[in-house]
Structures are given as C-alpha cells and as structure tokens.
Image (cartoon, coloured by chain):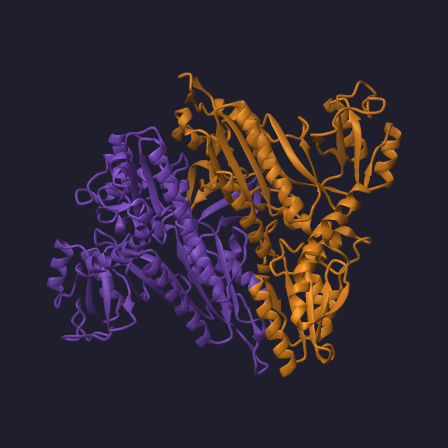
Chain colours: A orange, B purple
Amino acid sequence: MNDKQVKEITSRNKDFAQWYTDVVKKADLVDYSSVKGSMIIRPYGYAIWENMQNILDKEFKKTGHENVQMPMFIPESLLQVEKDHVKGFAPEVAWVTHGGNNKLEERMCIRPTSETLFCDHFKRIISSYRDLPLLYNQWCTIVRWEKTTRPFLRSREILWQEGHTMHESKEEAMKETLKMLKIYEDFQKNILAIPVFTGKKTEKEKFAGAEATYAIEAMMYDGVALQNATSHYFGQGFSKAFDIKFLNKDNKLENPYQTSWGCTTRMIGALVMVHGDDRGLVLPPRIAPFKVIIIPIGSDKKIDDALKEITEDLKDSSITYKIDNSNKTPGFKFSLAEVKGYPIRIEIGKKDLENDCATIVRRDTLEKVKVPVSEVVIKVNELLINIQNDMYERALKRRNSMIYYPDTYDEMKNIAKNKSGFIYTNWCGNESCENKIKDELGLKSRCIPFEEAAPTGNKKCICCGKKAETKIYWAKQY
Amino acid sequence: MNDKQVKEITSRNKDFAQWYTDVVKKADLVDYSSVKGSMIIRPYGYAIWENMQNILDKEFKKTGHENVQMPMFIPESLLQVEKDHVKGFAPEVAWVTHGGNNKLEERMCIRPTSETLFCDHFKRIISSYRDLPLLYNQWCTIVRWEKTTRPFLRSREILWQEGHTMHESKEEAMKETLKMLKIYEDFQKNILAIPVFTGKKTEKEKFAGAEATYAIEAMMYDGVALQNATSHYFGQGFSKAFDIKFLNKDNKLENPYQTSWGCTTRMIGALVMVHGDDRGLVLPPRIAPFKVIIIPIGSDKKIDDALKEITEDLKDSSITYKIDNSNKTPGFKFSLAEVKGYPIRIEIGKKDLENDCATIVRRDTLEKVKVPVSEVVIKVNELLINIQNDMYERALKRRNSMIYYPDTYDEMKNIAKNKSGFIYTNWCGNESCENKIKDELGLKSRCIPFEEAAPTGNKKCICCGKKAETKIYWAKQY
C-alpha cells in the first residue's frame, strides 16, 4: 500500500457502499478470496473478532453457559423434523453429496444454524427436571448460500456464536431469552459504542421455528438498519417435534421450553458503518486490538529514550500498542494509522522533544495535544475513556436525529423517498400492511420496542388507518 | 448416569478399545450424534480443548504469529494446483455440489487442510522481503472423509489449528519449522504430562506436498503410537506451484520458503490413553478444567462453614473447582469424580470435622490424607505440583519400559508378535524395507529422532541387512 492508496478512500457521502468496501479492504480487515462468496478475515479484522469473542464468552460463562461443539453436518432427514424450520432454511443451504469418490446414501447440508443438531443431542441427555436448565453455547462457522455477498454483512460463511438452552418452564425460558438480549445490548453500548433499539420482531420477520424473536437493531451512518443480534423463544415447538421429554417436579412427562440466541462477525461491519469516516476506520478503545499506535519520527538517542519511556509506561498500564517502524514517510504512517482506526496516535519527534513533549492525536476528533513525555500515559488513559464515551454519545445523537415520526401514510411515503433513517409509527399488527410498506416504500419492520410501544396520537395504523395495536420501527435494512 | 453405570468401565487390560470408548463416554467428553462419523464434544471435553487452545494460542502469539480466518471451501481447481497435495487429499474430501436448489458450476471441497487457500492469499499480499516473514495461524474445523472413526482419534470433522508461514530464506523457514515442533513438544511434556519422541518422518510418511515433515510421537498405554502434532517444511514447492514471488534484498524475484504445523483434538484422546485407568479419566492438573472436586457429605452448619472456608481459600489461590451438590450418594459422587479424572477430590464430612479436618484424595494414586480445614489449600497447592510431575515421570518410565532394541529381523518379528510398544532399529532408508515391515509386521515408521540417530551395533538395516543410514522407531499406530 502506498500513500496514494491510503488516501484513495471514496467519500462516505458520495458513495457509501464503495466507501465501506474501501475501508474494510484498506484497513486490512478482509481480503477477497478465489472462493466465490467467501472472504478472508485478515489478522487485524480477526483480532477484533477475538476481542468480541473474549468479552462475550466471559459474559456467557458468568451467566452459567457452557461451550460445546456439535457436528457441522446435518443429514437431510434431521433438517426436516421441524417443518417451519426446514422451510426457512432449505433454500439457502450448501449440500454435501460425495465423500471422496463415493456418493452419500443421504445428502447432508452444512449447518445454517444448529437447532436440529442440539435437539437431537438434548433428546439423548435430558430425562429429568434435574437435568435442566441446560445452558449451552457454540462458537463456530455456519453456511448460508447467499447470492450477493458483502464482507461481514452478508457472506456464505459466517463466524458466529449460537446459544441453545432448555428449561423446565415457559417463564424461565422467556427470562433467559431476554437476559441474553440484554447482554447483547450492553455489549453494543458499552464495548462497541453502538446505540441500539431492542424489541420484538413481527411474526413475518421472526426466526423459522421460533414462537418469538427479539433483536437489537442498530442504525448505520447511511440510515440503514443492521440487525446486530437476535434472541429467540422457541416454546415447545422443537422439543415436541423432536420428542424431547423430561419428568417434571410433579413426576409428569413434559416437553422442555427452549431458547436460542446468536451474534456474528456482522458486528464488525456495524463498527465500520457506525463509526468510520472519510479517513477510514474509527475503533472504540474497548474493542480495538491496539489502543495506541506510536510513530517515531526519525531515530536518535532522544527519540529512542522517549519511545522506551512511553512504551514502558503503556505496558505498566496494560494498554495495548503498536509501533510503526516501517521505512515509510511520517505522512504515510499518519494516513495509515487513520485508515486503521487506532483510537490514539502518539507521535515522537525531535521538535517536540526539545520541549520534552510528544504529540497525542485522537482518531475520533483528530484533535492534537502536546504532552510532556512523562505524562503521556496519564493523558492516554484519560483520553481512552473520553473517546469511548464520546463515540457512543455522538452515535446516539446522530441516530436520534434520523428517526422520523409521521402521522399519515403520505408523510411516511415522503420521508421514505427523501430521507434516510428509521421511521416510527403506529401499526395495526397485520402482515398485509407490513407487506404493503415493504413493497411500496422498501421498508422492513425492525422491532416493536419493549417500552413506549403503546399507540400514540390518532392511535390508527399508519398504513390501513384501522385501530393500531402497537408502535413499530421501519427502515431499509442490510 | 447411576452408580452401576459409572462403575461399568471395561478393564483397560481386558479390552483397551472398549475401555477407551467407555471412558470418553462416561467422563462426558463426547456423545455420539445422528451424523455418521461426527461426534459431539460435550462441555467437559470442550473445556479441555479450550484450555489447550488458550495455552497454545499464547505461545503462538508470543512467537509473533497472528490468527486469521480463511474460507472453509476449496474450489476443485484450487485444490489441484500442487500435484502431490491433491493426490494425497482428494480421495478423502467431502464435496459440496449444490447451493440451495442450484448445482454449482464448479464443485468445492470442505478444507481437509488449508495450504492452497493460504497460498492463494499469500500470492496477493506478498511482493517484497519487507512483507516477510508472514506468520499466520488459524483455529478451525477441517473435514476428512474417514471410513472408520473413533472419538478424538479419527473423525470426519477435526477441530485443529494450522500454522502457515512464509520466509525469505530456507534457513529461516527451517528454523520456524523446528521452533514450532519444540512448542508442541514442550506443551506435551509440561502441560499434558506426555513424554514424546520428536524427529523426522520418512519420505513415505511425510505430508502430501512437504519437503520434510517432523512430528511428535507419543506412546499410548497399550503400546500403540499416536502422532500428536506435526510441523512441515515446504521449501518452495507450493510457492512455485502458486507462483508466489517476492523481491529479495538483492532486488531479485524469488519464491518464498514455507512452513505449516498443526495439532488437533486428538490430543484429548492421547490424554485419555496415556493417563487413564480402570476407574476412568486421570487429568494432569495443568490441563484439567477443574483442578478440584469438592464433595460435602451431608449438610449442616459445620459442613457449610468448612465448605465456605475452603472455597474462599481456593478462589484466593485461583484454583478452579467444582462442588458436587447433587442428590446422589457419597459413593456415587466418589465414583463419578474418579471417572471424570479431577486431579484432587476434597471430601468434607461430619466425622473429619470433629477433628477440624477434611479428606484430600489424589486421583492419580488414590492416596488419601486428612488435613486441617485451614491448611487444605496449602496441601492442594503442593499436591497439584506433585501430581503433575509424578504423572509425567510415571508415563515416561512406562513408555521407556516398552521400547525394544532388536538386532535381527527375526528378533524384531518376535517382538512385534508378542509385545506391544516401540521398536528402535537401524534402517537403510529405503522404502522397500519400510513397506516390508509394514506388510509383514504391521508396524509403521514413527520418526527418525534428532539425536542418537546414527546407526549402532552392526550398523546394518534390520530388514535387508544392507548398510544402515539411520536409527528409526517403528510401532503400530492409531
């Protein structure tokens, strides 16, 4: 990569799709591969995913979940056990038909999700209420045969985690469903600095086989929605289809109550599209693989000494950092540091050192400040907290400025045509209106929020004018 | 699981294969699935794998390696680029032929290993010596269509890590190959308490596409060998086939020098077969998910107080533990603790508490000792170190007692027929003798050790009697 290439990022306001592609490529998050529809996650991108995994995995374990590993294959007959489920997934699975030179007796798909595999296992290991709750999670790759793909957002191979739990009562399963949704919500807010709406999906948009699906919905810079994680309440649907039974406390056989919940590398795409700018990636400190990039300008004893002092202080504070010692020009290094979105850049140069100072640059605001070498890490610590908070507040403010509240269908139409963002309206709850809004305005229902969901104003459906049942968010989606 | 089932482990000396199956099932490491040839790794088994991953991943990162994620599919044409490689792997891959309802234009296999994918990527990102070395690693699942499978040892789906590195000189690549082999060797010895032989594989046994393969070879309780990790030097074979070139320091285009290295969940199988006994699993403390199992016998204030004191001390010492509070009998709990191989069991009972004591039991020797409650964790800390060391020394002594040094082919034949273990002989280096020994004695070459490999005694090949080139180990293998 040369200086020109670093700077050759399409403007975000000119062509958002091209800007996104430029950033994920130039920040070295991904590379395209010779395998159609599959991407390569490069070290910098994968390090972000590892951070996500570590943080979430700790939360899952803290709440009593255990990791397991199921097969990656699902025999066709197993996929077909739950009828809604197979209908939803069969059209988009990859089929394995041959092992070596031999045709398989029964073809198998590569898991698009693992409910059927977990249920097959649960049937063998659940017999009493003493076996419940079973709180399992799996980190793995799934495959969905998408026709058009985009790095992180829509891919044939998806790295994800899928939680699968079994409970002795409906109440306990529902509590679990919402508890995990809350973990996702907190993770988005506190770690990724992404504000989200949480709520229930409509019947039309729920997971194939679920009784209810809950989601967290984020708004990207271009106003388009990204569903960032989901949590499903299955009731007894799968456990009846798979004939899973347990002896309950009243000594009666009963089908257990089930949940599943998941999130994927798609969250990396959200990071890019919520926080990035025309110079490239901007990473919130809490998820950045390196919180600091250090750029020594030139090399002499004074610079080396300052570098040593600063890196030792960073180590003492457990702040991750990287030093750019390449043979490029300082200008190139600054550009590259911006493309890669390190939260803080420290420049160590001769001129500053005459005053025993180094320059610290915030990636999010590009503000510069000169600080005595011995106080650099104190300042870095302070800035890391500020950057994390400011990034969230900025994203929240921007998102809130792009939510619209029309009273009539004409107003809604007008907004859909001329603005980007979320639209919040009354809705009758009927799929016919949902379909009409999708067909005519290109908007999909996002979620019915937990709070403030009671109809307001004229209390009529924005589309058909009949009595509204609820409030709901609409938006274009990735 | 009831008391009887726990105890229903086949004797190791009576039927080793059945004993192995009993232990991996009853210790809750795996469950069989409805997917032929694939197993389910249950939480207890997966926690062992997570420990292995965490420890090795730290070593890989400490030595400069970065994690990446390649596609899981390999288009048929890409698999075919390196000729030896495709010949070795094509017969045992799973083929994806359909995506949803559509037949693929080109079928793709699920990666049996990822050299071709990495090379395809390396070609795009390597152009100068400044891009080297490239030190990559990947944690993922691979697929090999095995006909007969056994949990952890031979499976259609294998969880593993594969390192792939590129270097500017042969020397540097060879150094990397051996450095990673050493990391595996140290891991086996210091963490898994498994003694291994390290050395070079023969031409016949090397990896398809490698110039040289190095391996660590462990001996199981039944004397059969398990190849526990491999490290390959590829030279320029793949980089020439894939036309990967870099501008070297002399400003000339050159093909880089490559390595790859890997280890799998097979190591869990090795743990079982090296350390297990007729009561079940025996885990070395450093790899055990829980170092201590606590069994309160009954429940009253005194027991609860002792339990509280001990668990707080364990937490302070960062010793992982589990409490068995189930409604089973103490006898059942003791048996289950033994089946699962927790290194140390603490029994807290009324009688002991009259003397303010608890009972500590070592899983490896079953030795019991009564210790004042306040000193339990001091004793546990001491025992954990002793158990780890003793397990290694015991395994080493046993292995060394099962190595045979015949001088003639007749002697070798006799040993192969009547004994189990490794056989160490002179060898001429010709594949014809290697084939004869395999066909007639059922033994495969294991490795040519780095040290003491010069022929000894009559310095003639054990098989053909011609001049020997080296010493070599032979054994039956898993």
Q: Is residue B83 visible?
A: yes
Q: Position of residue A388 (x, y in %)?
A: 69, 53
Q: Is residue B144 visible?
A: no
For residue A446, above or below residue A460: below
Residue drawn at x 65%, y 56% is A285
Furthest residue to the front? B355
Residue drawn at x 55%, y 61% is B120
Q: Nearer the viewer, residue A216 or A85?
A: A216
For residue A441, above or below residue B111: above
Q: Position of residue A34 (x, y in %)?
A: 59, 56
Locate residue B55 relative to residue B468 in the image: left or right.
right
Locate residue B241 relative to residue B460 in the image: left or right.
right
Q: How many marks?
A: 0
For residue A330, above or below residue A366: below
Residue drawn at x 43%, y 22% is A245
Q: Position of residue B408 (x, y in %)?
A: 12, 67
Q: Position of residue A107 (x, y in %)?
A: 47, 37
**Res A325 → quadrant:** bottom right
* Quadrant including the N terminus of chain B: top left
